[in-house]
Image (cartoon, helix red, strand yellow):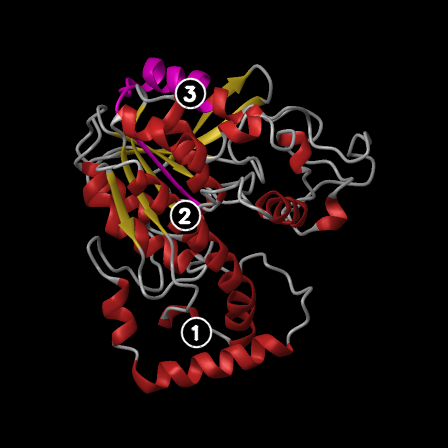
Amino acid sequence: MRSVRWQRGPGSSASSSAGAAGGSWAKKWVLGVATAMLLPLGISLAGSGAIASAGLNPAAFDFWVDSPVMGPIKSRVLRAADGNTNRVAYVLDGQRAPETLNGWEIETNVPEILASWNINVVMPVGGMSSFYADWNAPSNFFGVTPGSMGSATGSGATEAFLAGPGKSYRYDWETFLTQQLRSALRDRLGFNPNRNGVFGLSMGGSAALTLAAYHPDQFSFAGAFSGYLNISAPGMREAIRTAMVDAGGYNVDSMAPPWGPQWLRMDPFVFAPRLIQNGTRVWVAAGSALPMPEDLNIPFPVAADRLLRGSPLEALALANTRAFQVRMMSLGAQNVVYSFPPAGLHAWTNWQDEAYRMIPDMSANIG
């Protein structure tokens, strides 16, 4: 098992870790915030949420499947410890998803923990800023096809006219995950194509609920960590526009026209009744936008960057998640677990701990 800086097991609570920090934690937080305020706003976000060194897990293997629209797509698969093929979970990445490995494999030991719970782990690779959706068109601005000036790396708005995934072709992720990848896992590995789990962070959290809402035979469990679950709320489309430009130079208008049926179909607040009707077991979580001790026990420039960027993003995710909670409660939903730990930024520290809390519940509701 690859090492990470800390590896609390499933069931550990954020509240207990926050309470144990003491006065030294508070001093570091104040100093970290002060440092953050002095940093230029243009500091790179790359790696700012990391909790472990990037590394390939030798127990996992590449699983390539062709998409008729996107071409060959790599997923990483980690087999269940007991060798079963009945229990399967799809693990979705965030907005800066690289083309090399899934962020959950790079940044956490969550795939290993899932395998130890006798769950087969499927980690799709790539899809930066895609929301794992079927897009309306390849991403472009003003009708200019990107690609004449280099390739996108996820570093910001300067990449709007650079080449990258989903720019020379149209993203077709929902179809891929629910048709081509699902069938290949069944046919080549014998994986159960029904009653799978799916969860993710940020854009992957929103996508997990979408996949479960429209593909209930495939997904009986969905988890959203720091997801944007009320995307039709005032200002949310423009917030997503800004985030997508910053994460690889992508255009939200290429994904879905504003306020049309395609956009509303992606909004968990709108399709909430489907999750109830399907009987999907749902886990939704967001941090408080306050740092965990682990967010501060790192070099000050990294901690400051994490605070400066991770706090407002998590505050937005928290507001969205609370709105979704109110919506589900108004519908009388009895199929949702809500998790709002007292500390947690838009960072891997938060998402790793949330996965630990969620795993027992997912294990009981798949297969």
Image quadrant containing the C terminus: top left
Query: Residue 101: percent from the left, percent from the top?
Result: 48, 41
Q: Nearer the viewer, residue 257 or 167?
A: 257
> Dot 3, crowdedness within 10 Å: few (<14), some or many (≥20)?
some
For label 2, the SS is helix
Dot 3 lies on which element? helix
User: Can you give x and y, in whole percent of width and height, for residue 140 in the image?
Assistant: 74, 33
Instruction: Kindly identify the residue that appears in the image at 59 percent across and 59 percent down.
Output: 45
Q: In the rendered structure, which disc, 1 or 2, sits on the residue that comes first in sequence?
A: 1
Circle 2 residue: 323
Question: Residue at coordinates 40% horizontally, 35% vertically from top-left?
Answer: 208
> Which label is found at residue 296?
1
Q: Amino acid at mark 3?
A: Thr
Q: Determine the residue positioned at 31% across, 57% down.
A: 340
* Mark 1 vs mark 2: in front: 2
The kind of secondary structure element at disc 1 is loop
Q: Which mark is residue 178?
A: 3
Q: Is residue 236 visible?
A: yes
